[in-house]
Amino acid sequence: MTDDRRYDSEAPTLIEPVSDVREVKPVAATRPPPAVVADDDPLASLRRQAEARIGRIMGGRYHLRSLLGTGSAGAVYFAVDVRAGTEVALKVLHDRLRHREEHVHRFGREAKAASSIGHSSIVNVIDVGRDPDGSVYMALELLEGESLYEAIDRRGLSVSDIVEIGRQLLSGLAAAHARGIIHRDIKPENVFLAREPSGATRVKILDFGIAKYLQRDGGASFSTMDGLLIGTPHYMSPEVCTGGEIDEHADLWAVAVVLFHALADEPPFDDSNLGRLLMKVASGQAPSLAERRPDLPAALTAAVDRGLARDRASRWPSADAFAQALTVGGAPIAGLDWDDLDG
């Protein structure tokens, strides 16, 4: 229970206009931060506050045993439900945010979206509540494993692994889209590779905090917070970068970027300057995965390349269609049964 990136991924980047000149770390060169943070780290004080809660019983029910992770929005604890005697992951909104309506609303939206989908690839929300002291919390199923981010970073995935992860990820998104929910922040940190009791590995999609419910016309304007776009720039689609209307295709683009990143060991677009990065995604042509990995099956590179088509109408029409493209003759392209993997 020592992994600091298990549940609480970094909050989505708040994107200012393209003229922004802030520096961002190139993804290919980024490694997970160490568990111990320096005093000048902005998360240091939040972590200390989070650690101070250990030992408390939240909501008269959840005994906080240890800290699993701390992010800019909240902390996640290993906890025991004293009523049921079961272990859970308890996500608690930071004190500085619990009085801000937009953050409490986002917290509730995450719980509502995840719990309404009911799919094995969506993290299960068990309970949501507020402690007498005002703390807002969410009880989630306790997962063992690692994030896709960590697996990519340690280069521990085969092509077969990545193909099956993509298929399971798309299966979960298909269920979400069928209920009119778009995730809007698909990235390796939000794709968890959970080890089930049987030994099999199951993809779990985390953090529906900025999920959007599609309108009846099938589209939704990308929401803003105080005029800022919300998302993670390396995985944002061209229409998201320009603040345009979005639909399920934004999630499918993000999946294609995730697969490209996992297979090529770098995302299709990268830049240390945020403004230039957004311009590349918004107006550039994604490189072909076949050029970066000519050794991969043509059907696989073609599937990912289509997912990165600039024109939404040229991308895969649905998550199910994209998942089917990763399958040949009823089996994953790479031909290995995920349940038989050693992990």
Image (cartoon, rainbow, N blue to C red):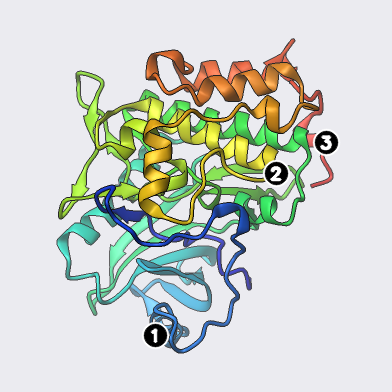
- Quick one: SS at disc 3? helix
Tell me if residue 101 comes above or below residue 332 in the rendering. below
Dot 2 alpha-carbon crowd within 10 angstroms: few under 14, some 14 to 19, many 20 or more: many
Going by the numbered disc 3, the residue's amino acid type is Asp
- Marked residue nearer the N-terminal end (3 or 1): 1
Q: Is residue 196 visible?
A: yes
Tell whether label 1 touches label 3 (CB within 8 Å): no
* Position of residue 122 in the picture relative to residue 211 (left or right): right
Q: State which quarter of the image contains the N terminus.
A: bottom right
| Total tally of numbered discs in the picture | 3
SS for dot 2: strand
Question: Label 1: few (<14), some or many (≥20) within 10 Å?
Answer: some
Q: Position of residue 113 (x, y in %)?
A: 34, 41
- Say which quarter of the image contains residue 86: bottom right
Question: In the image, 223: left or right of 257?
Answer: left
Residue found 52% across the figure and 30% down from its top: 286
In the figure, residue 312 lies in which quadrant? top left
Residue type pointed to by label 2: Thr
Q: Are marks 3 and 2 in contact (CB under 8 Å)?
A: no
* Distance Cα–Cα, label 3 vs label 2: 10 Å
Q: Position of residue 243 (x, y in %)?
A: 25, 37
**213 versus 56 height, above or below:** above
Residue highlighted by disc 2: 201
Q: Nearer the viewer, mark 2 or mark 1?
A: 1
Look at mark 1 in the image and give the residue it sits on: 45
Q: Nearer the viewer, mark 3 or mark 1?
A: 1
Residue identified by numbered label 3: 340
